Image (spheres, rainbow, N blue to C red):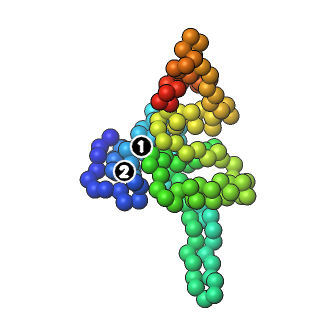
């Protein structure tokens, strides 16, 4: 992966990165693309735009549609990489979740902030299993292990 010059104004604290000739908006997105590539999972990067609220005119004033373009779309899932969400993200996310329900879009939506979260999302999308955490025997106050085999510190959740 190669770092690109310039600040990404659309994503907080993000610097564009390039992977295999594609310019991603952040290092997290490029790392996710690399993981998809390594796992042999076909995805499309920023190719699908969903109209969440159509264009409107109210009292003679025109309002543009509200749209959302997710980072990655696969056969059965949609992945949004969010290391540091911007202020409008919670509203867009709520609108998109509603869009999925109303339109009966046959894809699972995941927001990931790390590669371990991406791994868990891929497993859940492929198997339907949700990651569950349990205390590690003998270390119950310190660590948890998941049904995916991930281990995390209770103190730091890392």
Judging depth in this view, the residue of 126 and 147 nearest the camera is 147
Work out whether residue 127 can be spotted.
Answer: no
Residue lying farthest to the top in this orientation: 138
Residue 26 appears in the figure: yes
According to the picture, the residue beneath numbered tag 1 turns out to be: 28
Mark 1 surroundings within 10 Å by alpha-carbon count, few (fewer than 14), some (14 through 19), many (20 or more): many
Residue 76 image offset from top left, x and y in percent: 63, 43
Q: Residue 73 location, x and y as percent? A: 56, 48
Q: Judging from the image, what secondary structure is the residue with disc 1 in?
A: helix
Q: Residue furthest left?
A: 5
Q: Quadrant of residue 121?
A: top right
Residue 128 horizontal/vertical position (percent) = 68, 34
Task: Choose mark 2 or mark 1, whichever is in front.
Answer: 2
**In the depicted structure, whether residue 89 falls above or below residue 158:** below
Which residue is located at x 60 percent, y 32 percent?
Answer: 123
Instruction: Name the image quarter holding the N terminus.
Output: top left
- Per the image, the residue denoted by label 2 is 14
How many numbered markers are drawn? Answer: 2
């Amino acid at each position: 992966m190669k770092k690109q010059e310039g600040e990404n104004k659309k994503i907080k604290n993000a610097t564009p990165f390039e992977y295999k000739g594609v310019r991603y908006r952040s290092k997290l997105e490029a790392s996710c693309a690399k993981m998809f590539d390594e796992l042999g999972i076909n995805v499309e990067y920023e190719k699908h735009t969903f109209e969440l609220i159509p264009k409107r005119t109210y009292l003679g004033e025109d309002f543009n549609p509200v749209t959302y373009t997710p980072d990655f779309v696969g056969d059965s899932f949609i992945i949004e990489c969010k290391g540091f969400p911007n202020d409008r993200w919670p509203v867009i996310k709520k609108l998109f979740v509603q869009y999925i329900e109303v339109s009966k879009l046959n894809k699972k939506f995941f927001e990931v902030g790390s590669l371990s979260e991406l791994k868990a999302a891929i497993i859940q999308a492929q198997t339907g299993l949700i990651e569950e955490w349990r205390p590690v025997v003998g270390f119950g106050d310190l660590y948890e292990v998941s049904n995916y085999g991930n281990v995390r510190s209770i103190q730091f959740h890392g």
